[in-house]
Amino acid sequence: MTQEPARSLHVLVWGENRHEKLEEHVATIYPDGMHTTIAEGISENLGDDCVVRTATLDDPQHGLTEDVLAQTDVVVWWGHAAHAEVADEVVERVHRHVLAGLGLVVLHSGHWSRIFTRLMGTTCTLRWRSEHDRELIWTVDPTHPIAAGVPHPIVIDEDEMYGEFFDIPAPDELIFLSTFSGGEVFRSGCTFRRGNGRIFYFRPGDQDYPTYHHKDVRRVIANGVRWARTDLPRRRSPELLRYDTGEFFTGHGYRGAMADRIDTATDAATDTATGAAVAPEAAL
C-alpha cells in the first residue's frame, strides 16, 4: 500500500508590530519585526515540514480572516502594547477556530491578549520587572515533546522578569519553570486544551531584548508549534447531538441551547479551503 505523504504544517505568526515601528532600539534588534524573527526560527527548526506566514495588527482584519484561519494549523501570537486594538469580531473568530481545533502558541506578554484571557477565563495577571534579569528556564517534564532537544536549563542572559502569582487555570501540563536573578519563579511553559484546540504558553520574549534570536528559545517555540497541531479530519467544535439507544456513531442534529454557538462558518470555510464535501445534514 502506498502511504500518502504527510501534509505540511501551516503556521501563521501574528505580531502586533507596534514597538518595532515606534521604538528605535527595538527596530535595531528586530529590523524586520519580531514576527519575522519568530517565523524564521520556526522555519529553521521545522524545515520543509512547515509553511510559515506572518500577519500583523495593521493588516486588514488583522490578517486573521476566516479563509486564512481555515487554512492555518497553528497561530503563534505576540502582543503587548495594543491588546485593546484587536477587534471583537477577530477575537470571536480566533476563539471559535481554537475550539474547533486550531492550535495556538501564545508568547510572553500575549498572556494579556484578549484571545488568551478569553480562553483561560481568568485575569492572567502576574508580577513583572524589566531590569535585565537573568532567566533560567528549567525543564520539569523532560519527556514532553515540547522539551525535545532543549538544554536543562535554558540560560537567557537578559530578559524581563515575570513572577508568580500567575492568574491562570491549573495547566494541563507544566513543562518549564523559570527562575530569575531576584529569586522569583514563574510557570513559563504551560499547555491547555480548549474544545478540540491545543494551546501552549511560553514566557520569554520582551521586545527590549534579543530573546527571539536565542537558538534554544526558537527550538521550544518550534516544538510547541508542532505539538499544537491537531490532525482532525474536519475542524469543528464539539457539539450537542442526540444519539438513539444502541447508536454509537451517528448523532442527530439537535443543537438546542447551543444553536447560536455552533461553528457553521468555521466548517464551511474549512471545507472550502480543504476541498472537502459537506454532507447535507452537516450543513443544517
Image (cartoon, rainbow, N blue to C red):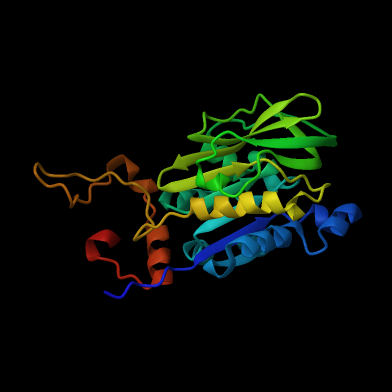
Whether residue 76 is situated above or below residue 119 in the rendered picture: below
Whether residue 271 is situated above or below residue 97 in the rendered picture: below
Which quadrant of the structure image shows residue 1? Answer: bottom left
Nearest the viewer among 85 and 32 is: 32
Q: Which residue is situated farthest in the bottom direction here?
A: 2
In the visual, does 202 lie left or right of 32? left
Q: Which residue is situated farthest in the right direction here?
A: 24
x and y percent of residue 33 in the render? 77, 60
Nearest the viewer among 89 and 77 is: 77
Nearest the viewer among 233 and 4 is: 4
Tag count: 0
Whether residue 255 is situated above or below residue 284 in the rendered picture: above
Residue at image x 31%, y 46%?
239
In the visual, does 248 lie left or right of 217? left
x and y percent of residue 54 in the render? 65, 64
Query: Which quadrant: the C terminus?
Result: bottom left
Residue at image x 73%, y 46%?
205
Q: Is residue 89 visible?
A: no
x and y percent of residue 265 in the render? 41, 59
x and y percent of residue 101 in the render? 43, 52
In the visual, does 86 lie left or right of 226? right
Nearest the viewer among 216 and 22 is: 216
Q: Is residue 183 visible?
A: yes
